[in-house]
Each structure stands twice: as C-alpha cells, then as structure tokens.
Image (spheres, rainbow, N blue to C red):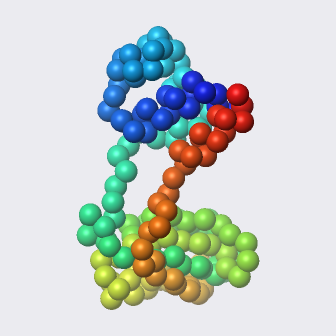
Amino acid sequence: MIDEIDRRVIDLFSAEPHVGVLGASRRLGLARGTVQARLDKLEARGVVTGWGPRLSPAALGYPVTAFLTLEIAQALGHGQAASHLAAIPEVIEVQTITGAGDLWCRVVARSNDDLQRVIDAVLADESVLRSTAVIALAEQVGHRVLPLARAAAGRSS
C-alpha cells in the first residue's frame, strides 16, 4: 500500500520527471532524506518500476498499433514463444491470457501493409500456431497507472 506522502511524491515525479530529489523536497515541503527514502522504498517494493523516458511508437515511425491473439504449441510452452516474440522489435507487450487464445500481443507497424510483415515474423516460430489481429483505430485512454496509485493512497488513509 502507499500513503498520501507516497502519492504526492509519485504525482510530482510523474508530472515532472526531471524535478530531482532536492527540487521535490522543496516543492512538497518534505526533507530531502524523506523524499529519497520514499523513492527508494517505492522502487524496492516494485511500485515504481522505472525512470526512463516514455516513447511514442508513432513518433518513431510506427503509427499502426494492433493487438494479436496468439495460439501457441502447448508442448513447446510459453517460454519459447515469449523468447521468440521478445526478439521482434515491433512486439511491445505480451501477456498470457485466458479464453480463446494463449497470448495477447501488442504490436506496432509502419503501415497496414507493414503489419503483415510483423505478423509473419510473429508466426515464423514453430511455437506460435495461429494469430488473429485487431487493428487499433484511435487511442481513447492510454496506458496509465497514476489514477490507480491515487486510489490506492486514498484507501490507506
């Protein structure tokens, strides 16, 4: 769980990732050591998983996003399929799922035509048997976790 101080630290660093610990301590009215200790704890507990820049696939030349549902060869297991998929740069997320498929995969491509090349690369390993694709038309709500952190802090107060 996170508390209100954690939430404030997360909010500030989410909005202004370059603020720095000293700047954050001044803005939040907390001791520098408190801010650093909170950041260290959040990282150690796996709440904060990284500090790197968030990249836009579209700005990198990959404006097409698609979601693939994959069926895999059960005898070969998830590991082989996951290793194969991790080697494809256009594969930006893979999850094990329940239901009709085995894996859910978010991929990007340079165009709808290029998407075929990406799907062919996904299917190029014997561990991946079949794929169905859904092309995203527009992002309505992007990947986000900050509202969840705020809600979690509200419950612990």
Give the camera-side residue of 20 and 80: 20
Q: Position of residue 136 (x, y in %)?
A: 45, 77
Q: Is residue 103 above or below residue 23?
A: below
Residue found 65% across the figure and 67% down from its top: 96
Quadrant hosting residue 103: bottom right
Q: Is residue 29 above or below residue 16?
A: above
Give the camera-side residue of 81 and 47: 47
Q: Is residue 15 above or below residue 138?
A: above
Q: Position of residue 99 (x, y in %)?
A: 73, 77
Question: Is residue 140 shown left or right of residue 57?
Answer: right
Residue 125 appears in the rendering: no
Residue found 42% across the figure and 17% down from its top: 25
Q: Position of residue 10 (x, y in %)?
A: 50, 34
Question: Is residue 121 shown left or right of residue 83?
Answer: left
Q: Is residue 137 above or below residue 84?
A: below
Residue found 35% across the figure and 46% down from its top: 53
